[in-house]
Image (tube, rainbow, N blue to C red):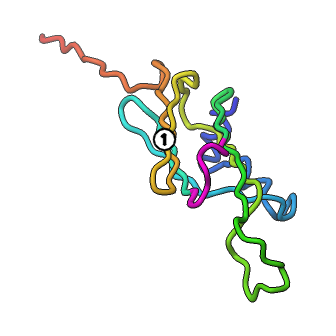
Amino acid sequence: MTREIMHFMPSMDIDRFFGEEFFGNQNFAPAIDIYQDNDDLIVETSLPGIDPENVDISVENDVLTMSGETKDKKEIKREDFYRKEIREGSFSRSVILPVAVKGSEAQAEYDNGVLKVVLPKAEDAKPKKISVNIKKK
């Protein structure tokens, strides 16, 4: 059912649909890139300054969820700020994946503030080459 919805709304994103306007500014949902190669679906998100030990990743029913928490390293009172744009606190992002994946085989790496999740495609989601037999008359 989720893939049928994605067919009509390819940019459908659970968190963006029910975003800050809906729930208020409780946490933030980091921006993501989703792309594929022949065998894998790859999801990348920028999480600078976040300890990868504080990041949780799960895949259930072809929905990827990434969540965690950033902690402010300095004890500065809010009234001492002229501008406070760097987010802190919890973050969460759930997205319906565009193809079926083998969630149990997913791998993640964190390098220079970028979290990369590699999800092997399920066999039925991989492109298949079909040969055409031509009959000569």
Q: Residue furthest bottom?
A: 82
At 55% from the left edge and 27% from the top edge, which residue is drawn? 100
Q: Is residue 47 left or right of residue 78?
A: left
> Does the magenta-highlighted stretch encompass residue 21?
no
Tell me residue 94's x, y (percent). Answer: 69, 44
Image position, residue 103 (x, y; %): 58, 25
| 52 is within the stretch colored magenta | yes
Q: Which residue is mark 1?
A: 109
When the figure is inspected, residue 51 is found, relative to residue 85, above or below; the finding is above
Q: Position of residue 99 (x, y in %)?
A: 53, 32
Question: Considering depth in this image, is 100 or 49 the residue closer to the camera?
Answer: 49
**Where is residue 8, by image quadrant?**
top right
Kindly indicate the quadrant of the structure image that contains residue 35: top left
- Compare residues 133 and 122 and report the one nearer the observer: 122
Q: Quadrant of the C terminus?
A: top left
Residue kind at label 1, given as amino acid type? Glu
Residue toward you, 3 or 101 = 101
Q: Is residue 134 above or below residue 121?
A: above
Q: Quadrant of the N terminus?
A: top right
Stretch of the chain drawn in magenta = 47-55
Q: Residue at x 80, y 62 (%)?
A: 20
